[in-house]
Image (cartoon, coloured by chain):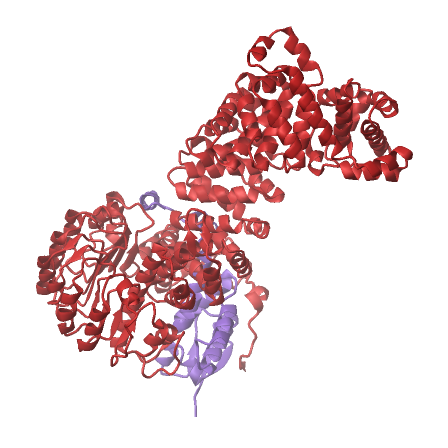
């Protein structure tokens, strides 16, 4: 049989599933199927090694642990040519355990001085390249030993963090020990003396690439003698004598690329270098104030030499390097990377340029200078995106970090520049970043995730990220075993979870579970991850549906654990905020009660209200406020010392932010719902600070304080305290002039409680001596209060609709009065039987003002559609209020408002009475 | 005049392949005959390999987006087929195809934790020594 093949490949191969029951399979490749699984150990060895090479070391390790053969293959020297230890806290023991694999190690990246100390134990004597960052603490001794043990070293890079403790002595050691050195780039060294540079000249004949970046003093005379150097960067280095430089360095016979970015080089020096050096091809002078400030300096074209500066078109300049390429402009990097005909010289220049440009752009972005807007929009963003596609991993990482940094214009408030963010998006940056985030390299994953996170502060970018599948990617990265990756991914989810748009997508992508798991995984020693995870969960918990998912995923336990155990303030703040949001859906799910039942939760939150950090205090008070909506939680908070703590918080917050003031008052409002707590608050001294907060200009603050005072005033003892502490003028002021209807309403009700007679009896019984001594006249206060209550109620009575309603009891007329009187938010207030009873009793008060006020209040509490209207109506029916209402509505002497409001309340009661039978 | 190669599967089905496609295989290239039997590879798999070779022989630019998409679809098969394709491509020494297939396996493994890998791959003896070593690596 013979045939030509033109078969279509089945989609996903679904129709071609080879079932394990096929009898022939066993003889095809022995043992290829194992209990229905494919036995991958049957793969040829070289293919397995290739498979390992597509994975990062973490995945390699897990794969190598599957069987003996693969474990042996996993240590093949060819897989261990390069090692990135940056995500690990590498100690001696760990390095020793890796030593057997590192015989042929060529490239090593590490982070931090501790890891530097451990490098020796890898015993990787054949290392060619070492690159370290966060080396502030690395010493001369450590560096000297490292270079002494790695004599084959060709490249040594330490930075971009400053190497403050490294001196010229260590550089001399490098020169003596590493004769094959080609590349030396060091950042932030105080003094690079002539003897160190001379040692390099003498002992390292192959040294072609030197960077003394962000140093303080570099001996420019000695650098003029390093004849081997082709590429030199002194970017950010201060105290250079540019006059001397321009007379010396042009004699360097091989100098091809020179980077003087971020220095005070003068235009004269630039001109001289460009005109007199024979070999120089590219002079990079980005962000040099002297040069940019010289208005007479015209970047004259020097024959076949490029000047890259903020005021030149960098991509266009670079295109001039390519004589044979017709496509120019924005694609110069791409064209170069894809070009078939390789020119070694050109490749060296471009590779070097990628590195120094990424470095300089990141530094400029970090410095957040003013006046660079045009540069970033016109070419900075494009350059960073170009560099992100480099084949050098560290360039890609730095470009991504640069993108993450340059959009942020205010770190404190996390505000980003919209124009810049959208410039990144316009150039296809989101897709590029997401592709990087998908890479197997963890360094790229974390930097790309960081950029996506920062850019997503902009709503349009966030939308693009979501549309391009970014939420799935971030949720995936949040599950990473690498802390740095997980941290940035959680940050991305935090920013995307702001607002309503992407919350459900995050939940669908498994983000909620991933974030909760992060908290358990890094519960000790990962403050950054924890803060971001808790912050994201806090945003997600603001949504009713997501908050249920957070609870199902174990989020309550996780967040309470953070609130209890974590010592880092950022984490405490976000955990408390998350708990506050979880508890904010009291009507629709049981999270509120669930938080209270978690052991130690309420105690921890009470503790946090005493934190030295204002944000923590604020969110903890907010959480307690929300939690106190649940009756059991409310009493448990009080039992845990909540009253004392919150009174103390209110006392100490006179200069705090409105956010904290509002929550402190709110938490007291919540607790004061029960009279026992109310009494305790009064006893602890809560009245004075609440009166102070009621005087606040901020509506949110004084409204909340009015609510708390209203609850407190129910108790005659507290009412008297409020009078004594000067609360009457404060409440009168609120009642007459707050911008918030609710604040006016609650202030009026507080005053009504204070002057309906109960306090007078209480005052007569005994403790009035104090009030007399303070010179408070109860009668005067009462007159003032009643006058303002009356005015308040009258603002809701339009004479025309009232006379219409008085003339006929037609539903339409009454409905119109209701509409005019209605305070929307009052529908959320819930009164106890005692409170309702008190208003009913007030209907019979001799004061016509209090009669009207009581009828007005009952009207608000019973308007059909209000959240607790049914509850209030049934309380009133049980208390026989209807009789009192009818009397009030019919009384000859009562004011018109009281009569009409009472009539409406009666109708409301009828409505609610009818409702269940409908 | 280009030659035609005949590839015979282990279940005795013969595929005729044009020279340009056949020579993508180093094994065929170094063979003296134009009739080659491929042991251990059945028609179902060999047919797929031949299809891949034909596609790649007729496409000039392998970096082209269209062929990339075609390749992506080609390797989107279940584990059983993937395994057999790798074995076949390895035997025939078609480097690019081996690259693509192993990359696909790598992608399937990526970002999975040890636990998931254990579920997908039959686990033999994870030696204590290895576990401890992993722990010391911070995994």
Q: In front: A233, or A692? A: A692
Whether residue A769 appears in this view of the structure is yes
Q: Is residue A587 above or below residue A266?
A: above
Could you tell me residue A908's position as x and y percent? 82, 32
Could you tell me residue B118's position as x and y percent? 45, 49
Q: Is residue A667 left or right of residue B62?
A: right
Location of residue A193 by image quarter: bottom left
Q: In front: A715, or A889? A: A889
Question: In which quadrant will I find the C terminus of chain A?
Answer: top right
Q: Is residue A127 above or below residue A765?
A: below
Question: In which quadrant will I find the N terminus of chain A?
Answer: bottom right
Location of residue A846 by image quarter: top right
Whether residue A30 appears in this view of the structure is no
In the displayed orientation, state which residue is furthest to the top. A766
Q: In front: A48, or A612? A: A612
**Total residue callouts:** 0
- Chain A, hue in figure: red
Could you tell me residue A284's position as x and y percent? 27, 68
Q: Is residue B76 left or right of residue A748?
A: left
Location of residue A372 by image quarter: bottom left
Q: Is residue A623 left or right of residue A857?
A: left
Chain depicted in purple: B
Q: Is residue A712 above or below residue A915?
A: above
Q: In front: A595, or B7? A: A595
């Amino acid at each position: 049989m013979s045939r030509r093949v033109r078969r279509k490949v089945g989609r996903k191969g679904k129709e071609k599933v080879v079932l394990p029951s096929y009898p022939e399979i066993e003889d095809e490749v022995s043992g290829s199927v194992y209990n229905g699984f494919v036995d991958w150990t049957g793969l040829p060895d070289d293919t397995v090694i290739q498979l390992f090479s597509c994975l990062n070391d973490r995945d390699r390790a897990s794969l190598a642990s599957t069987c003996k053969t693969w474990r042996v293959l996993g240590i093949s020297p060819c897989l261990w040519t390069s090692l990135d230890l940056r995500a690990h806290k590498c100690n001696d023991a760990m390095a020793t355990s890796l030593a057997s694999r590192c015989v042929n190690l060529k490239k090593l990246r590490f982070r931090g001085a501790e890891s530097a100390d451990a490098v020796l134990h890898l015993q990787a004597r054949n290392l060619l390249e070492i690159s370290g960052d966060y080396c502030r603490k690395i010493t001369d001794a450590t560096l000297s030993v490292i270079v002494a043990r790695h004599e084959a070293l060709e490249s040594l890079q330490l930075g971009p963090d400053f190497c403050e403790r490294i001196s010229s002595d260590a550089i001399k050691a490098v020169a003596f020990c590493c004769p094959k050195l080609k590349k030396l780039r060091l950042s932030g060294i105080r003094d690079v003396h002539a003897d160190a540079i001379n040692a390099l000249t003498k002992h390292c004949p192959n040294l072609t690439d030197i960077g003394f970046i962000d140093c303080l003093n570099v001996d420019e005379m000695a650098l003029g003698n390093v004849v081997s150097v082709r590429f030199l960067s002194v970017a950010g280095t201060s105290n250079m004598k540019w006059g001397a430089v321009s007379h010396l360095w042009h004699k360097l016979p091989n100098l091809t690329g020179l980077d003087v970015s971020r220095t005070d080089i003068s235009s004269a020096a630039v001109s001289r270098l460009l005109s007199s050096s024979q070999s120089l091809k590219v002079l990079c002078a980005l962000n040099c104030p002297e040069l940019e400030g010289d208005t007479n300096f015209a970047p004259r074209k020097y024959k076949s030499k490029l000047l890259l500066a903020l005021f030149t078109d960098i991509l266009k300049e670079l295109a001039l390097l390519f004589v044979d390429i017709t496509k120019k402009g924005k694609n110069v990097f791409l064209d170069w990377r894809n070009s078939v005909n390789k020119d070694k010289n050109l490749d060296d220049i471009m590779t070097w340029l990628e590195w120094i440009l990424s470095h300089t752009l990141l530094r400029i972005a970090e410095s957040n200078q003013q006046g660079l807007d045009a540069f970033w929009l016109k070419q900075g963003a494009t350059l960073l995106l170009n560099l992100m596609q480099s084949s050098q991993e560290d360039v890609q990482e730095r470009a991504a970090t640069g993108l993450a940094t340059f959009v942020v214009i205010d770190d404190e408030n996390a505000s980003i520049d919209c124009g810049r963010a959208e410039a990144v998006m316009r150039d296809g940056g989101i897709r590029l970043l997401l592709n990087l985030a998908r890479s197997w390299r963890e360094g790229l994953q974390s930097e790309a995730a960081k950029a996506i996170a920062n850019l997503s502060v902009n709503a349009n970018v966030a939308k693009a990220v979501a549309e391009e599948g970014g939420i799935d990617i971030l949720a995936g990265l949040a599950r990473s075993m690498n802390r740095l990756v997980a941290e940035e991914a959680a940050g991305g989810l935090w920013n995307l979870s702001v607002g309503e748009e992407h919350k459900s997508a995050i939940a669908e992508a498994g983000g909620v579970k991933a974030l909760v798991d992060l908290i358990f995984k890094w519960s000790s020693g990962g403050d950054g991850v924890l803060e971001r995870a808790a912050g994201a969960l806090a945003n997600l918990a603001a949504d009713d549906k997501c908050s249920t998912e957070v609870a199902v995923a174990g989020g309550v336990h996780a967040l309470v654990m953070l609130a209890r155990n974590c010592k880092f303030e950022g984490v405490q703040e976000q955990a408390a905020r998350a708990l506050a949001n979880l508890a904010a859906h009291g009507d629709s799910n049981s999270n509120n009660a669930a938080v209270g039942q978690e052991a130690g939760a309420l105690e921890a939150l009470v503790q946090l209200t005493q934190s030295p950090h204002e944000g923590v205090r604020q969110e903890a008070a907010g959480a307690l406020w929300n939690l106190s909506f649940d009756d059991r939680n409310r009493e448990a908070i009080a039992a845990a010392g909540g009253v004392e703590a919150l009174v103390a918080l209110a006392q100490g917050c006179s200069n705090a932010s409105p956010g904290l003031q509002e929550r402190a008052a709110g938490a007291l409002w919540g607790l004061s719902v029960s009279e026992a707590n109310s009494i305790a608050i009064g006893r602890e001294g809560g009245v004075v600070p609440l009166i102070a907060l009621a005087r606040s200009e901020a509506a949110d603050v004084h409204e909340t304080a009015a609510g708390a005072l209203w609850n407190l005033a129910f108790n005659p003892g507290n009412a008297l305290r409020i009078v004594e502490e000067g609360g009457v003028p404060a409440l009168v002021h609120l009642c007459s002039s707050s911008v918030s209807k609710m604040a006016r309403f609650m202030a009026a009700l507080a005053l009504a409680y204070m002057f309906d007679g109960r306090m007078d009896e209480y005052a007569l019984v005994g403790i009035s001596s104090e009030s007399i001594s303070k010179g408070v006249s109860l009668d005067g206060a009462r007159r003032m209060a009643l006058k303002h209550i009356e005015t308040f109620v009258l603002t809701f009575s339009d004479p025309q609709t009232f006379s219409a309603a008085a003339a006929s009891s037609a539903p339409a007329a009454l409905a119109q009065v209701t509409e005019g009187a209605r305070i929307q938010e009052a529908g959320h207030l819930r009164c106890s039987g005692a409170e309702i009873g008190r208003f009913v009793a007030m209907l019979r008060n001799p004061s016509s003002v209090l009669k009207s006020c009581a009828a007005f209040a009952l009207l608000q509490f019973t308007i059909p559609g209000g959240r607790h209207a049914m509850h209030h109506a049934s309380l009133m029916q049980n208390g026989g209020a209807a009789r009192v209402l009818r009397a009030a509505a019919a009384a000859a002497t009562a004011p018109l408002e009281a009569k009409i409001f009472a009539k409406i309340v009666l109708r409301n009661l009828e409505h609610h009475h009818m409702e269940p039978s409908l | 005049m280009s030659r035609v190669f005949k590839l015979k599967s282990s279940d005795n089905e013969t595929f005729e392949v044009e020279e340009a496609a056949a020579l993508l295989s180093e094994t065929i290239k170094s063979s003296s005959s134009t009739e080659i039997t491929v042991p251990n590879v059945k028609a179902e798999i060999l047919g797929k390999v031949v299809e891949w070779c034909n596609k790649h022989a007729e496409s000039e630019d392998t970096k082209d987006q269209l062929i990339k998409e075609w390749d992506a679809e080609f390797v989107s098969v279940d584990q059983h087929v993937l395994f057999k394709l790798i074995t076949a491509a390895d035997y025939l020494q078609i480097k690019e195809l081996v690259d693509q297939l192993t990359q696909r396996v790598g992608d399937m493994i990526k970002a999975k934790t040890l636990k998931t890998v254990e579920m997908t791959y039959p686990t033999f003896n994870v030696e204590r020594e290895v576990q401890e070593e992993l722990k010391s690596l911070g995994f």
